[in-house]
Image (spheres, grey):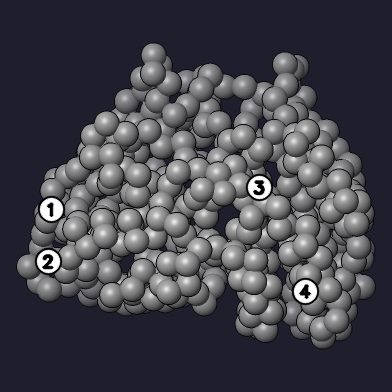
């Protein structure tokens, strides 16, 4: 149940996101302890002529949650409201971190069908920006939403589902904070199951040659390409009858903590100080991770710790265009003087029916490029973005990009449907900010 503290209001302090590339200074911060306190804060902001935005854990690289008005922090709006085993749903408060949700569901013998690769975000922050994992048949976290509760600009609390306010439900599952403040989400869940993960190094050319087959044969396939090399690391997750065979404590420490976090931090620090060393380091790094197979409950397979800070751009391209797009990206890197110490991540998702989902109405592949925090990233990201947009790529709403509303109107078939709903729900742009003005228009 929700925490029974009293919410608080304080003068705003500078807010900074996880990556440190976005800052803002709100006039005040409000930490509501109930939906009633949240609606009161929204009404008061409107009376004071201030914009209002909710922020989760700040894992977006865009200014989607930045405001110079009222900043809503939902950390007291946490916990599971109800579990409906008969209908296979769980309703959870919007400020609940995914990590807490996954742990709580596991204790109840339940699980989400699919999830992203980190679980630090709040459920509302993750879904509002379109966070996703990889899946042949199962889609983003937002696509698993069966209902949601939304506080609108008028201070009204709307309950939305396929049957109740269906037009709002269709759009608000990925609303980028433009339609109101989400206060609760109902997810589809299922009895907990086991996944067997197979991690295996593979040559870049082989992964691309076999990509359609690897995608078709595995429920969840993803891979990482190490720039300046012809090497990839692949991961295949498939449902298993068991038995459980988790990663051993020693193997987990070596692979996930030492190599993927500790040593990776050191390597990136060296690369930032001496970029010329990066290609040689990349060749070693790309061969450091060995093949391994393990079987565990979903969140222990899908997610992993990410302690090395970075800045990220990710674009969704039509799945049929993945191989060509990635070859163009590799050619660009090989011909340039860029020095890139972070692997490029590739995942997939089936088409869904959410207006602003990056997989809206098309089978999708995701290509994510990263740069270590504090390293100049603009030249790499600009060159990558030119390649992605040539293939009608759609950028992740929470990751670095330079696209504007006119571009989105072309690549999203239901863009006008979303903006018309925004005009109806928030005509005065109470939930607006500079980022939404750029991506959705005035």
Alpha carbon distance from label 4 to label 2: 46 Å
Question: Looking at this view, is 338 or 348 the one in front?
Answer: 348
Are dots 4 and 3 in contact, CB under 8 Å?
A: no
Are dots 1 and 2 in contact, CB under 8 Å?
A: yes
Alpha carbon distance from label 1 to label 3: 38 Å
Alpha carbon distance from label 1 to label 4: 47 Å
Q: Residues within 10 Å of mark 1 (few under 14, many from 20)?
A: some
For image coordinates 63% across by 59% down, the residue present is 317
Residue 84 located left or right of residue 403: left
Label located before the other in sequence (1 or 2): 2
Instruction: Check disc 2 and report the residue beneath it.
Output: 46
Find residue 417 and report its horizontal and vertical position in percent: 33, 56
Q: Circle 1 sits in a helix, a strand or a loop, which is it?
A: loop
Can residue 85 be seen here? yes
Instruction: Check disc 3 and report the residue beneath it.
Output: 348
Q: Residues within 10 Å of mark 2 (few under 14, many from 20)?
A: many
Mark sitting on residue 155:
1
Find residue 180 and report its horizontal and vertical position in percent: 25, 55
Alpha carbon distance from label 2 to label 3: 41 Å
**Number of numbered labels in the structure image:** 4
Q: Circle 2 sits in a helix, a strand or a loop, which is it?
A: helix
Label located before the other in sequence (4 or 2): 2
Mark sitting on residue 340:
4
Label located before the other in sequence (4 or 3): 4
**Which quadrant would the N terminus be assigned to in this image?**
top left
Tell me which corner region of the image, top left, top right, bottom left or bottom right, holds residue 8.
bottom left
Find residue 49 and report its horizontal and vertical position in percent: 12, 73
Give the answer, above or below, for where 433 lies relative to 171.
below
Can residue 184 be seen here? no
């Amino acid at each position: 149940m929700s925490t029974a503290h009293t919410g608080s209001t304080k003068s705003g302090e500078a807010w900074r996101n996880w990556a440190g590339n976005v800052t803002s200074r709100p006039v005040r911060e409000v930490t509501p302890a109930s939906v009633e306190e949240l609606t009161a804060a929204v009404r008061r902001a409107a009376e004071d002529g201030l914009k209002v935005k909710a922020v989760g854990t700040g894992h977006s690289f865009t200014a989607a949650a930045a405001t110079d008005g009222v900043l809503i922090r939902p950390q007291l709006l946490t916990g599971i409201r109800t579990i409906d085993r008969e209908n296979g749903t769980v309703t959870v408060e919007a400020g609940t971190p995914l990590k807490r949700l996954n742990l709580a569901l596991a204790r109840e013998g339940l699980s989400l069908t699919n999830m992203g690769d980190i679980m630090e975000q709040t459920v509302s922050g993750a879904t509002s920006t379109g966070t996703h994992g990889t899946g042949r048949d199962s889609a983003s976290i937002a696509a698993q939403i069966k209902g949601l509760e939304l506080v609108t600009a008028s201070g009204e609390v709307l309950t939305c589902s396929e049957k109740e306010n269906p037009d709002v439900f269709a759009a608000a599952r990925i609303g980028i904070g433009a339609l109101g403040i989400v206060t609760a989400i109902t997810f589809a869940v299922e009895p907990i199951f086991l996944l067997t993960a197979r991690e295996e190094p593979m040559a870049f050319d082989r992964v691309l040659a076999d990509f359609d087959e690897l995608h078709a044969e595995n429920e969840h396939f993803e891979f990482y390409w190490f720039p300046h090399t012809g090497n990839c690391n692949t991961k295949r997750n498939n449902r298993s009858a068991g038995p459980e065979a988790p990663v051993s404590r020693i193997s987990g420490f070596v692979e996930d903590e030492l190599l993927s976090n500790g040593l990776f931090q050191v390597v990136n620090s060296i690369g930032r100080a001496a970029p010329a060393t990066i290609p040689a380091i990349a060749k070693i790094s790309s061969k450091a991770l060995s093949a391994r197979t393990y079987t565990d409950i979903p969140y222990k397979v899908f997610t992993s710790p990410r302690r090395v800070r970075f800045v990220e751009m990710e674009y969704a391209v039509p799945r049929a265009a993945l191989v060509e797009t990635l070859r163009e990206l590799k050619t660009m890197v090989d011909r340039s003087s860029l020095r890139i110490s972070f692997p490029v991540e590739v995942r997939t998702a089936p088409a869904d029916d959410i207006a602003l989902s990056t997989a809206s109405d098309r089978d999708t592949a995701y290509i994510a490029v990263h740069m270590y925090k504090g390293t100049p990233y603009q030249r790499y990201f600009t060159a990558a973005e030119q390649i992605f947009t040539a293939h009608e790529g759609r950028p992740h709403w929470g990751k670095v990009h330079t696209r504007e509303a006119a571009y989105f109107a072309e690549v999203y078939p239901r863009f006008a449907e979303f903006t018309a709903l925004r005009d109806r729900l928030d005509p005065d742009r109470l939930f607006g900010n500079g980022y939404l003005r750029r991506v959705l228009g005035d």
